[in-house]
Image (cartoon, grey):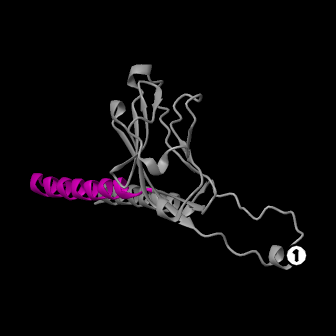
Amino acid sequence: MRSLEANWKHNVICWVIYLLFLHLIDKVSLEVSGFVGDSVLLPCLYQERELKPEEINVFWRYNDSKNVYDIIKGNPSTDKQDAVFKGRIKNFLSKKGDFSIVLSNLMVTDAGQFSCDIPSVEKDSKLTLHVKAHPTMSTTASNPNSTSDTRSCSMKSQPEGIATFLTVVLEFFLLHFICVLY
């Protein structure tokens, strides 16, 4: 049987480990890739409960400063939208809880961190956008009469971000198990 002091030390160690992993989980973000000139989906979902119209305030930002897109009391607002994003954003407001946006006509300068903040429910999602030049297509170049579309679908997320998140969650549970046994 452990002494009271040993139990106290054990609990402190477990809490420190928990806090470290919670900090790491907070730093994991989704990564999305796209090609210059294409469109890309920037996801932002809140489906824990249905929000009232007055609660639907969503603020999309680029690198924590530029205004990408706002939704105020359930209505799109582009009044303070940064000029670089004007006319390039589409939303999914018809779907409940889906505050994702599509950024069209990607430019290399769009690469960076995007955040979707929903203050009424304390949700702040971050994602990193990578923008690449289209790869050269040798089959199209060798056949100039080809009518095939050389644009590839860029509306997909990088699996590495999801794998990293799942790895952190698994490590968290393993450490919890170790703390329980310790």
Q: Nearer the viewer, residue 63 or 117?
A: 63
65 lies above or below 17: above
Screen quadrant of the C terminus: bottom left
Of the 4 image quadrants, the one containing the N terminus is: bottom left
Q: Which residue position is annotated with label 1?
A: 143
In the rendered structure, the answer to whether residue 176 lies left or right of residue 42 reads left
| Horizontal and vertical percent position of residue 177 | 37, 56
Residue 116, quarter of the rendered image: top left
- Residue 73, percent across and down? 41, 24
Numbered marks: total:
1
Q: Nearest the camera: 112 or 85? A: 85
Provide the major secondary structure of the magenta segment: helix
Of helix, strand and loop, which one carries label 1?
loop
- Who's the residue at 27% across and 59% down the image? 20
Q: Residue at x 17, y 55 (%)?
A: 12
User: Looking at the image, which residue is at 61% across and 70% down?
Assistant: 133
Residue shown at the point (31%, 53%) measured from the top left: 22
Residue 95's image quarter? top right
Stretch of the chain drawn in magenta:
1-29
Q: Quadrant of residue 134?
A: bottom right
Where is residue 138 shown, x and y percent of the image?
79, 78
- Kindly identify the amino acid type of the residue bearing the numbered disc 1: Asn
Point out the residue furthest to the front here: 83
Does 56 sit above or below residue 110? above
Query: Does residue 101 appear left or right of residue 122 in this picture?
Result: right
Is 17 one of the magenta-colored residues? yes
Q: Is residue 137 above or below residue 25?
A: below
